[in-house]
Each structure stands twice: as C-alpha cells, then as structure tokens.
Amino acid sequence: MWTVNTDMKRTIRIGTRGSALALTQTRTVADALEREGDVNVEIVAISTPGDRSDKPIAEIGVGVFTSALRDALADDEVDVAVHSYKDLPTAPDPRLALAAVPQREDPRDALVARDGLTLGELPPGSTVGTGSPRRAAQLEALGLGLRIVGLRGNVDTRVRKVTDGELDAVVLAKAGLSRLGRLDVITEVLEPIQMLPAPAQGALAVECRVDDVDVEHLLRSIVDDQATRAAVAAERAMLAKLEAGCNAPVGALADVVEDLDDDGRVVMRLSLRGVAAVYAKNEAGDPVVADLLRASATGDLTAAEQLGRDLAAELLDLGAGVLSGPESRS
Ligand SMILES: NCc1[nH]cc(CCC(=O)O)c1CC(=O)O
C-alpha cells in the first residue's frame, strides 16, 4: 500500500515574537500569503531576551527583540521573520533580505489618559508614562509641566497603569493599539507637529534568507507596499546617519505627497520631517533636554535614502551631535 500526497503546496514557516502584538501582526502577513500565495503557512513563536527582561530598553540594547528571530531565520528554523520595523537595528544583516514592507498603519503616537483628557487638558504635574527618550524629550518640550515617568512592559500592562490610577497618562504607538483592537482607550492622537514618531513606527519588516529567491519573490509580490517602503527607507536612512554622529533620540516621519513638476504636472514625492533632541547637563550632572532640533525636506520617491541622509546632515549641522542623551530607538 502506498499513499499519494495530493497536497503539493509548500509550507512556509513564519517566525515571530510570542507577544499578542507580534502574533497579530504576523497573522496579517500569514493570511495574505495563504489567501494569495497558494502555500501553507505555519506560525512559529520565538522567545527573545527582550521578552524575558523588564529592564529599560536603553540598558539591554538595540536588537533585543529582533536578533533571536533573525538567528532562527538564518539557521533555517523558519523561512520568514516578521518584525516591528522600528525595533530593527539600522545595520543590515547580510544573511537576510528585506523581502517586503507591508502597507503601514497610522504611524502616529497616541495618548491614553484618565478621564478622557487630552495632553493640553492634563494639569501641570500630571504623570505621563513612557520608556522612550524620544517621547520624553518631545513631551518635555511642549512646556506643559508634565512629570515623565519611566515605563516598560507590553501594551496591556502600560494601559493598565492608567486604568488602575497609577499614572495620569501613557503614550503609545497608535499602530500597536490598533492591531490589538484597543483604539477605544485612546484619548488623543498626537499630531506629528507635537510628537514625531520613531522612524518606521507602524510599519512591519518581513525578512527571508538572502538566497531564498522563491520566498523573497512570493513576499515581494503579495505583501510589499512601495509607498511604505520608500517612506520608511527615508526615515531609517536619517536615523542611521544620525546614529553615526550621536545617540540622541530621533523622531522621523515621511509622507508620500502630491507635488508639481517643472511642467506643472502632478507627481508623487516624499516629504520628510525629522527631530533630534540636544541635551545639556544639569547641576546633578544628569542629561536634560536643552533643545529640540527640527528639519524637513522634500525629495524624489526614487531617492528616499538620500533624502534621509541629507536631512540627517542638516540636523547634525544644527548641532544634533553636540551632547547626546540616553540611547533610544523607540
Ligand atoms: N517599542 C515597542 C514597540 N515596537 C512596536 C510597537 C508597536 C507599534 C509599531 O509597530 O510601531 C511597540 C509599542 C509602542 O511603541 O507603543
């Protein structure tokens, strides 16, 4: 007796962190592949040191959430890795290819405050939780007299600090709340003019092994979004160049916008805004935000990375490298 395997579909193993957020965003990639790719998909949760530690990210370092996943992919334990793009180090991993950048969620940060309050309605002295020096610096610069309190943990844990009355508010990525179905807790979506998001916030990075051309082609044709890829490339190029010159917290946001060319025809271009904090030392020798440097520029969609590097150069000229504060990427 013998049986014929009639199911000739290839099975693609997709690696992800095990958090509710990571699993949900990986599910969207898996669903698209199963729907349009004529493949079977298996989701493999991989535990990372970042998931097992409660220390501030600034202490445990960049890549804590992503390097275990990248290793599993390079070692052929999975075929695809789905990351929150903003958690990836800027240095490329030569073992891997960035096969797809799916369409981005709303990149903005969101306030979750007690009693439905907005930032402007929080009385001076209110406590606002965030573990991100980028968010802390921009909150301080608003001059509202808010007390910034360090914070870590998953999205639900952070929201609970407000619902339990421990903090007056927390700031989180809107995309994370959206993916978890928790948009209802948002009391204000923060405009980029007040708070520029982390480079690549709200976007996913989908990687495969550099020599796995079949999977790369599959991912590129089904889940890649070119506008998101260009926007995120500009933001990340800006971050990468600034990292070389300083470790100041950086915010960046690129939008695809309509513009007119020399002949008055409508063309799509990339508009990039960036912010970097400059620190000074107070009497106790601790770094405090002395200034927020801002710059913006518009460029060709096909030269996204150059636009990012140019804007970083402008911020460095303005003094972004002078005295760097706490390291941060989120
Ligand atoms: N730093 C943690 C992190 N990494 C990705 C997200 C979700 C949002 C996203 O994909 O950018 C979050 C949570 C947050 O910043 O509130």
Image (cartoon, helix red, strand yellow):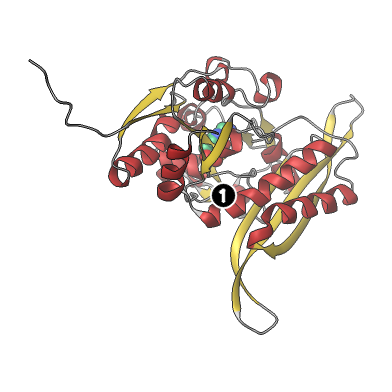
**Which quarter of the figure has residue 306?**
bottom right
Ligand 1 found in image quarter? top right
- Left or right side of 193 for 104: left
Name the residue beneath numbered marker 1.
Answer: 108
Q: Residue furthest front?
A: 1
Q: Position of residue 215 (x, y in %)?
A: 43, 37
Give the tally of numbered discs. 1
Q: Position of residue 252 (x, y in %)?
A: 68, 49
Above or below residue 75? Residue 330 is below
Above or below residue 260? Residue 304 is above
- Left or right side of 10 for 327: right
Residue at the image point whose x is 90% and y is 51% from the top? 317
- Can residue 183 be spotted in the picture? yes
The amino acid at mark 1 is Arg
State yes or no: Cβ of the residue under disc 1 lies below 8 Å from any atom of ligand 1: no
Q: Position of residue 5 (x, y in %)?
A: 18, 26
Residue at the image point whose x is 89% and y is 36% from the top? 323
Q: Position of residue 121 (x, y in %)?
A: 59, 49
**Which quarter of the figure has residue 12?**
top left
Q: Crowdedness of circle 1 by 10 Å Cα count: few (<14), some, many (20+)? A: many
Q: Nearer the viewer, residue 318 or 192?
A: 318
Above or below residue 220? Residue 70 is above
Residue at the image point whose x is 60% and y is 33% from the top? 87
- Left or right side of 123 for 214: left
